[in-house]
Image (cartoon, grey):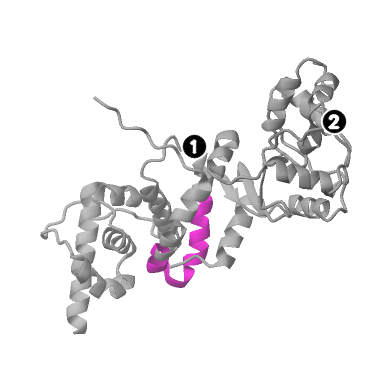
Amino acid sequence: MNVTTDLDTRFRAAAVAEGLVDVRYDVVASPVGDLHVAATGRGLCRISYRCDAWEEELARGFGARVLRAPLDDVRRELDEYFEGRRRSFDLPLDLRVAEFPAAVLQELAQVPYGRTDTYGGLAARAGRPRAARAVGTIMNRNPIPIVLPCHRIVGANGALTGYAGGLDVKRRLLELEGAIFQG
Amino acid sequence: MGTMATPQVPPFERFYLMHRDEVLGYLRRLLGARAEDAWQETFLRALRAYGRLEHGRHLRAWVFTIATNVALDELRVTKRTVPQVDLEPAVELQRDAFRELEHLTGALPPTERAAVVLRYGYDLPYAQIADALGSSEEAARAAASSGVRRLRRTHERDH
């Protein structure tokens, strides 16, 4: 006895409407692969390039009531971004990080579309100029890549260094924004 | 002495995907065409309680318990008591025998229907059926036994 798509959709909508879900997630197709996106009642809380043990990670971070359900606003803004029609995001965020990472991510959010900054530069603007390595770690653990644009942070010599989604993805995002030229 | 690791509560999505189909099947057997609303109510109730679960043990029996409560509410069974003392000898069915009688379960009184379907349709042990019915294990066994006898009588009468 299989649950029909219609019945399944109605249940998921009712669960969200009743506010019974700790965190819901969706999968958004993009030119850099499928993006796993998640939001709590407060806002967007995760974007991930990888999907292994994704529900478990969400449960650990936000509660066991994890449910897949449409995140239309997130999908729309990401679509617009990848179509080149959006330069910044208007989505509310639910960031649950310590004080320094929060300060760094807040500064990161100010790096404009199509521009890059360095780990050291970001560290300085977050008030700890010698913390470039710590900033590297914070970029690596960025819970909401793309929307918090850690792809715009590069090495002091301009090298792309690392990216959770892989260097190819970082390069494509910077190309999309016109920050580097396709080579 | 090793200790058994307590299973964690899985993310609700996994729990839901694992049980949604068989719970709908169960409710169809109990409620027929009214099963869909009861199915949604079952998983909404599960979701309401899910954040308070302390471990991931017996989740299948747990969701069957919720489904049974929803179904018996729907069937307006207010008196959940089943015979505590069963004077007749307990009867058990083989799986094949149940398949032959399965189509007749709709005519059983609701608690007997739930007990029989949980026992033979879903292989739940009597301890878990007792939880689902909110009764003692002995009473759950009696309800299933009585249901089986009733099924057999109906079957013999029709043949």
Let me know if marks 1 and 2 both belong to one chain: no
The quarter holding residue B158 reads: bottom left
* Residue B52 marker: 1
In-front residue for pair A50/B102: A50
Quadrant including the N terminus of chain A: bottom left
Q: How much space separates mark 1 and mark 2, taking CA atoms?
A: 45 Å
Give the chain of mark 2. A
Residue bearing the label numbered 2: A117
- Packing grade of label 2 (10 A; few <14, some 14-19, many >=20) is some
Q: Position of residue A107 (x, y in %)?
A: 83, 28
Is residue A119 inside the magenta stretch? no
Classified by dominant secondary structure, the portion drawn in magenta counts as helix
Q: Residue at x 41, y 54 (%)?
A: B69
In-front residue for pair A115/A180: A180
Q: Position of residue B30 (x, y in %)?
A: 38, 66
B68, above or below A143, in the image: below
Q: Nearer the viewer, mark 1 or mark 2?
A: 2
Amino acid on which disc 2 is placed: Asp
A131 relative position to B53: left or right:
right
Q: Residue at x 82, y 50 (%)?
A: A81
A111 relative position to B10: left or right:
right
Does dot 2 land on a helix, a strand or a loop? strand
The furthest residue to the front:
A183
Q: Position of residue A28 (x, y in %)?
A: 69, 54
The residue stretch that appears in magenta: B26-45
Amino acid on which disc 1 is placed: Arg
The answer to whether residue B55 shows anywhere in this view is yes
Q: Residue at x 58, y 39 (%)?
A: A58
A170, above or below B103, in the image: above
* Residue B159 marker: none
In-front residue for pair B134/A9: A9
